[in-house]
Amino acid sequence: MKLFWLKLQREFLRVLNIWTNKEKAEKRMKSLQDGIARVQARNTLEQDIPSLFTVPANTPKPQPIDILIPVYNGFEFLNPCLESIFRNTDLPFHLYLADDASPDEKVLPLLQKWAAKKAGQITLLQNEHNGGFAKTVNKLIQASAHDFALLNTDTEVPPGWASRLFYPIFTNENIASSGPWSNAGGAYQSLFFDNEETALQLPLEETDDLLRIFSPESYVLLPNLMGFCMAVSRTAVKQGGLFDEAYGRGYFEETDWCFRLNRLGKKHALVSNLFVYHKGFSSFGNTARYELLHQNRTLFKKRYPGALAAMRRARFTPKLQLIHFILLARYLRTQYNGFSSENAESTAPALCTQQKGEIFYYELRLGEKRQYACSRTDLRPYISMPPSFTRPV
C-alpha cells in the first residue's frame, strides 16, 4: 500500500510540475524516487542469499556450440572480438561469420583472412546486398547445427565465458535463451547505465572476475534479453521459429523472438556470473538508429500489447535487484580507494549499513544516485571478498 501511495504522489507531482517551482519539484521528485526504491528493495528479504553463491554438485557435460556473428562495418572491432573468442572460449565451437554487404571495403578482406587462418573452424558467408540484422542472423542460424551464441562485432568475451553463458540452456530444457551482464546491455543487463551512449567502458576481465562469485544456478528469469550476446537453444528455434525479418535492419527482432517464445511457455535467463564487454551502437549513426528504434518499437507494441510494461516491471524483480546491488558494491569497492562502509555522508562511493533486529538495511551511494537493498543475511562479506578465487560460503 505504501508503494502505491508513493507512486501516486510521484505521478501527481509530474502533472503539477508544469507550474510548481522547478527546484522544489525536483527535490520532492528525488525524495519520492528514493522512497519507492527503498520500499521495492524490501522484496529482496525473501531471497535465499546463500544459495546464490553455492557451487552446484554437478556440472553439465561440455557440448559443442556454434558462434554466429553478423557483420556490418565495425572494422576496428573485429580483431579484438575474434581474438577474444579464440583465446577464451572453453567449449568446442564452430564460428559462422556473415558479411552483410558492408560498405567499408576493409571488412571482407579481414574476414577472409581470418577464415583462411582458422580453416575448418570458420564458415564465412556473404550477402550480395544489405539484408539487415534479422535476415543475416537467420541465414547464419540455418547454416549452423548446434545451440548457438549470437554475438555483435563490438563485443569481447572473457576467459571461460561459453560454459557459463550456456549453463542455463544445458541444464534446463525450459530455457530458450541466456545472456550476460555488460557495460552496455539495455535495461536489465547493464551494470551502471541503461543508456549505451553513456555506458562506462568497464575493463573486461577485472569486471568479470567480480561476478564469478555467483553460482551458475543464480541466473534470473526475465521476459527478454538483448541480442548483443545471447545464447540460444536450437530446440527453442525449432519450436518458435527464426527472427522476424519484418524488423529490417535491426532493433526489437530479438525482443519479438523472446516474447514469441514466452507464449510457448519458455523462459530467458540473465547469467549472474558473467560479464561481456559491449561497445554499443557500432553499426548505425544516430539519425538512422532513432528512426529504426521508433519504427520497430511501434511494430512490436502492436504485436505484443502490454509487453513494454512487462519489461519495465521486470527491472524490479527482487532477485535481479539484489544481485545488481551486490555487483555494483563489489565493483565500486575495487575501483575507488575512498570507498567507505560508514554511515557518514561522503563524496566518495559509500555503502551504508544499518541493522534492526534480524534485518540488514543497505544504502549504496554514488554521487547523487542511490541503490537500496534489504536482507536477512549480512551482504558485506560477499561484497568484500576478493574476485572469484574464493567464495564466502
Image: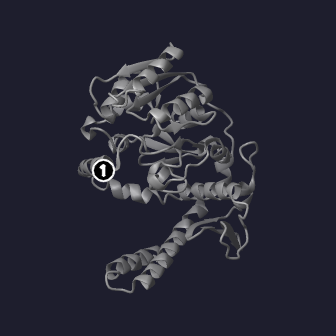
Q: Residue at the location (43% across, 44% down)?
A: 226
| Image-quadrant location for residue 145 | top left
Q: Residue at the location (41% across, 74% down)?
A: 7
Q: Residue at the location (48% across, 60% down)?
A: 316
Inspect this view and state whether residue 367 appears.
yes
Which color scheme does this rendered protein use? one colour
Q: Residues within 10 Å of mark 1 (few under 14, many from 20)?
A: few
Toward the viewer: 173 or 141? 141
Toward the viewer: 117 or 15? 117
In-image side of 26 versus 206 (left or right)? left
At label 1, which amino acid type do we have?
A: Thr
In-image side of 55 versus 89 (left or right)? right
What x and y, as percent, mark residue 263?
34, 43
Q: Is residue 200 above or below residue 88?
A: below
Q: Can you say which quadrant of the picture contains the N terminus? A: bottom left
What x and y, as percent, mark residue 74?
43, 35
Inspect this view and state whether residue 174 appears.
no
Q: How many marks?
A: 1
| Image-quadrant location for residue 335 | bottom right
Toward the viewer: 265 or 379? 379
Q: Is residue 93 above or below residue 135?
A: above
What x and y, as percent, mark residue 42?
57, 67
What x and y, as percent, mark residue 82?
53, 28
In-image side of 70 versus 91 (left or right)? left
Q: Which residue is mark 1?
A: 287
Q: Secondary structure at mark 1?
A: helix
